[in-house]
Image (spheres, rainbow, N blue to C red):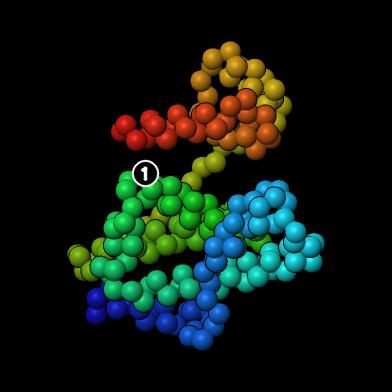
């Protein structure tokens, strides 16, 4: 039995709702326009409060169905799975998709859980892949352990965002996470320009 056959059997056993007649989980053009509009202009113009609330409810339902549909990805042939991202996207687009998909999954799991559980699930998947590959290729069981250390300094040892903002204005360089912290607090003086520069640098590599 191939690794894909095993994945297929596993997927069929764990799919939350296997009803093929279940509502599709793909956003409509109007759904996308609604989500992209951060004001009452455009598609939201003229919609009542109740209509907006119903639209958000419908979009949540679509995302819930999409999460279930993701489970069906394991029913694809291995070659098809490998081509999902490799074909049709250039390197920059693929990187952007991978980051946003991972961010979305992280948010979904963290919404009702904790950070350790998320990383526990990630570690489990990585270890399972390593053990399975070694078993198929070498006929051995390989004990695997993943260790993670997260160093979070006390708040009183961290520079304030005002200080970071000022030092950034003075030309000092900061890691991406510092830029993200300023952006999260709506304090970044030119975050859009920073993102554009990062994209240009990535494209030149």
Residue 110 seen in the figure:
no
- Residue 48 image position (x, y, % from top left): 79, 62
Horizontal relation, residue 40 to residue 21: left or right: right
Residue shown at 54% from the left, 41% from the top: 150
Q: 71 above or below 179?
A: below
Question: For mark 1, does the 10 Å Cα neighbourhood hold few (<14), some (14 to 19), or many (20 or more) residues?
Answer: few
How far from the left and from the top, in percent, is residue 186?
68, 34
In the displayed structure, 161 sits above or below 57; it is above
The one nearer the camera, 90 or 99, is 90
Above or below for 34 versus 156: below
Q: Quadrant of the N terminus?
A: bottom left
User: What residue sits right under mark 1 in the picture?
Assistant: 92
The secondary element bearing badge 1 is classed as: helix
Question: Along the line of sight, which residue is nearer the eye, 10 or 61?
Answer: 61
**Residue 83, percent from left and from top:** 29, 62
The structure residue drawn at horizontal position 43% and vertical position 52%, both measured from the top left corner, is 97
Task: Residue at 51% x, 86% y: name it.
Answer: 21
Residue 66, horizontal then vertical, whole percent = 52, 70
């Amino acid at each position: 039995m191939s690794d894909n056959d095993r994945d297929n059997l596993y997927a069929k056993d764990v799919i939350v709702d296997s009803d093929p007649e279940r509502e599709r989980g793909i956003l409509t053009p109007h759904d996308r326009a609604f989500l992209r509009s951060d004001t009452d202009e455009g598609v939201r113009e003229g919609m009542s409060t109740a209509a907006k609330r119903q639209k958000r409810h419908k979009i949540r339902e679509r995302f819930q169905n999409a999460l279930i549909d993701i489970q069906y990805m394991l029913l694809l042939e291995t070659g098809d799975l490998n081509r999902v991202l490799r074909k049709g996207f250039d390197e920059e687009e693929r990187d952007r998709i991978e980051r946003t998909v991972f961010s979305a999954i992280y948010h979904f799991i963290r919404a009702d859980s904790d950070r350790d559980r998320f990383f526990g699930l990630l570690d489990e998947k990585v270890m399972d892949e390593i053990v399975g590959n070694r078993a198929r290729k070498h006929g051995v069981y390989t004990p695997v352990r993943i260790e993670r250390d997260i160093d979070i300094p006390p708040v009183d040892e961290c520079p304030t965002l005002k200080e970071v903002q000022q030092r950034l204005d003075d030309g000092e360089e900061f890691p991406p996470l510092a830029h993200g912290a300023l952006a999260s607090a709506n304090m970044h003086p030119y975050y859009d320009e920073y993102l554009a520069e990062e994209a240009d640098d990535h494209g030149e590599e």
